[in-house]
């Protein structure tokens, strides 16, 4: 499969992105190809990295993780070594959903889910500010999730 996708591949990606539970038969029927062809195409989409993973999206409130917190992090040094050390440490914190190196006022922006403000206060004091190289954090408690994890437009 080349880096270019045809209209059937794109349609399959859109459908699977919106409903990862579609069966091969349902997907094949929707894109008007045989189930065997659909299976081969889906496998190639995985093999070539167009589909990175398939997983369930768990409702955070149902598992006592209803508070969403965004944290801007500033490191004490902006060197490749300090970034690498921070990144290695942040991957071990399971409450961090996303960590992005950014340009601007912060070095990193974190997306964190916790049970409540008290829960965040504990992990902030015990783990976040203790990360290697952290000079400053700025915390933003999300009041309302307007768009979250929207499908990619292509």
Image: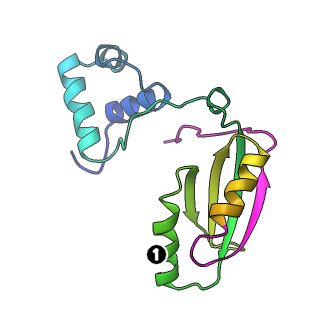
The x and y percentages for residue 84 are 46, 75
Q: Residue at x 65, y 45 (%)?
A: 113
Relative depth, front residue between 43 and 110: 110
Residue 20 sits in quarter: top left
Relative depth, front residue between 89 and 151: 89
Relative depth, front residue between 108 and 1: 108
Residue 137 sits in quarter: bottom right
Magenta span: chief secondary structure: loop
Q: Is residue 42 visible?
A: yes
Query: In this rendering, is residue 90 above or below 83?
Result: above
The x and y percentages for residue 44 are 23, 39
The x and y percentages for residue 58 are 55, 30
Q: Which residue is mark 1?
A: 84
Q: Is residue 22 left or right of residue 91?
A: left
Q: Residues within 10 Å of mark 1 (few under 14, many from 20)?
A: few
Q: Residue at x 58, y 84 (%)?
A: 78
Query: In this rendering, is residue 1 above or below 93?
Result: above
Q: Is residue 143 magenta?
A: yes
Q: Is residue 47 left or right of residue 126?
A: left
Q: Residue at x 31, y 17 (%)?
A: 32
Color scheme of the displayed model: rainbow
Q: Is residue 145 left or right of residue 47?
A: right
Quadrant the N terminus occupies: top left
Relative depth, front residue between 119 and 144: 119
Q: Is residue 60 left or right of residue 121?
A: left
Number of on-image labels:
1
The x and y percentages for residue 83 are 51, 76
What is the magenta range? Answer: 129-154
- Indicate the secondary structure of the residue bearing disc 1: helix
């Amino acid at each position: 499969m080349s880096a270019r996708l045809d209209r059937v591949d794109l349609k399959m990606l859109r459908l699977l992105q919106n409903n990862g539970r579609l069966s091969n038969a349902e997907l094949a029927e929707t894109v008007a190809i045989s189930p065997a062809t659909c299976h081969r195409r889906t496998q190639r989409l995985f093999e070539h990295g167009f589909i990175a993973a398939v997983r369930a999206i768990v409702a955070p409130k149902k598992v006592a993780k209803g508070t969403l917190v965004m944290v801007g992090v500033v490191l004490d040094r902006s060197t490749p070594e300090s970034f690498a050390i921070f990144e290695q440490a942040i991957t071990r914190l399971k409450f961090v959903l996303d960590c992005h190196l950014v340009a601007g006022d912060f070095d990193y922006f974190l997306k964190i889910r916790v049970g409540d403000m008290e829960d965040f206060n504990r992990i902030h004091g015990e783990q976040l500010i203790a990360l290697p190289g952290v000079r400053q954090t700025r915390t933003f408690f999300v009041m309302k999730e307007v768009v979250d994890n929207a499908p990619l437009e292509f």
